[in-house]
Image (spheres, grey):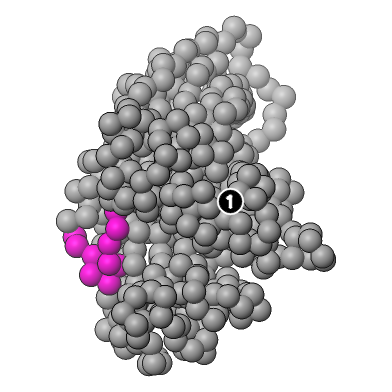
Amino acid sequence: MRRLIITLALISCTISAKAQAPDTVDHVESEARFANPERGFYLYNNLLNLSREIGRSRAEGHTLIWGKIPLDAYREQTPLPQAVLDSLTRGFATARSSGMKVIVRASYGSRGAGGDYTSYEDPSQDVIEKHIAQLAPIFSQNADVIALFEAGFVGPWGEWHTTEIAEDNARGRAVIFHLLQHTPPERMIAVRYPYFKQQLFRTDGREYERVDAQNAYSSSPVARIAHHNDCLLASETDYGTYERGGQTRAQETAYLSGETLYTLFGGETCNPHPLNDCQRALEELSTLHASYLNSAYHPDVLEKWRDQGCYDEIERRLGARIVLEETRAVRQAERGSVLDVEVTLSNRGFAPLYNARGVEFVLRNSESGALFVFPQNADPRTWKPGQRHVLRGQLYLPENLPIGTYTLCLFLPDPSPRLRWDPRYAYRMANGDMWDAEHGLNALVSGITIR
């Protein structure tokens, strides 16, 4: 039976619950690995031919599909055939029904006339931009199950190197801004090289626009461009990821560290190297605020992490890992009063959340199961890693709230109306014995009596 769900407005009020000392409930961190949306080790898949069996991978902790859109056969063809659009639409529908989200990247192949990537050439810029415009409505319709875009379209594998467009900043900038205009404004686009983003937003001389606390999450172009590295810790320059424009690796990683505190970072490893030994890997993933990595590549690096003992920690800490430390709330309150709540939490993952998400307190009636929702004016993307945060709420208890016993819960739903009450898309706290898998709620305090 569907639970009764009532949303109650957050208000400022001087009324308080009857004078009573709040109880403090201490929460215990769990070391368990579990599925949480928009983070973790992704599964590489062809988005135009996505198997309906993909949803079974959630039991293994996977919530991200790296969705390739292969356009090799249409390098000289516009518009794209309807069959391609239909296949893409089905791919997103499969991801949705499976409780997954997609990292989207389109590409036109990886081999050129010489048989390898060094001879690869892009389609014409006109073809690329027409394809992007044609795909835009499908991206818009499925924005809620898109976690992010990797820029794609240019260079072998869509990795933005080797080709004329990739090496010409003016042409590259035109394609990126075309992509920004034809993708949902609430989604970020990750580019392959930090130097390229600096060139995209160069202002004067050696200066360039950056993302910071003032412009983050604003949907402005600079705030929407993020970063990925497909040769993470694979060589002294990560196979040309760094030192492309005169800066040292240390300078560029310092730049990335500031950017990814407000955007996102992910990618894959591509070659075993001493740099990707466990200790350095953990430091790098923390510095760059990593949210996602390839679950299958490079297999030798992944095996090294297992042998050296850091794989499980990496799997737990990719993205945001929110740990509730304590909750303070009174256990008895009257209708018409305000229930004050204070929750202390910390983010022990590598990264902050990068997409918008609601923060709500919920009172769950112990007898009927009815849910009474109290939205909060809070943005969980500001819960940065390595920091403790305090969430304070005032819950106005309406006069017609049924008397009885309740459990106070914390709810971080997906903002999409289609996904809001799907528990697979709600964020789970890294604590034991708190998760309400039916509703996607984190139980904070039980036995609250409303009189």
40 with respect to 129 (left or right) = left
Q: In which quarter of the image is residue 448?
A: top left
Q: Quadrant of residue 120?
A: bottom left
Q: Position of residue 415 (x, y in %)?
A: 48, 51
Dot 1 falls on a residue whose secondary structure is: loop
Name the residue rendered at 56%, 33% in the picture.
385
Name the residue rendered at 40%, 36% in the picture.
277
| Residue 44 in view here | yes
Q: Which amino acid does label 1 sit on?
A: Thr
Name the residue rendered at 72%, 24% in the picture.
14
> Residue beneath label 1, please?
263
Q: Nearer the viewer, residue 196 or 127?
A: 196
Q: Quadrant of the N terminus?
A: top left
Q: Position of residue 143 (x, y in %)?
A: 45, 63
As drawn, 115 above or below 242:
below
- Based on the picture, tell me whether residue 48 belongs to the magenta stretch: yes
As drawn, 129 above or below 365:
below
Magenta region, residue range: 42-52
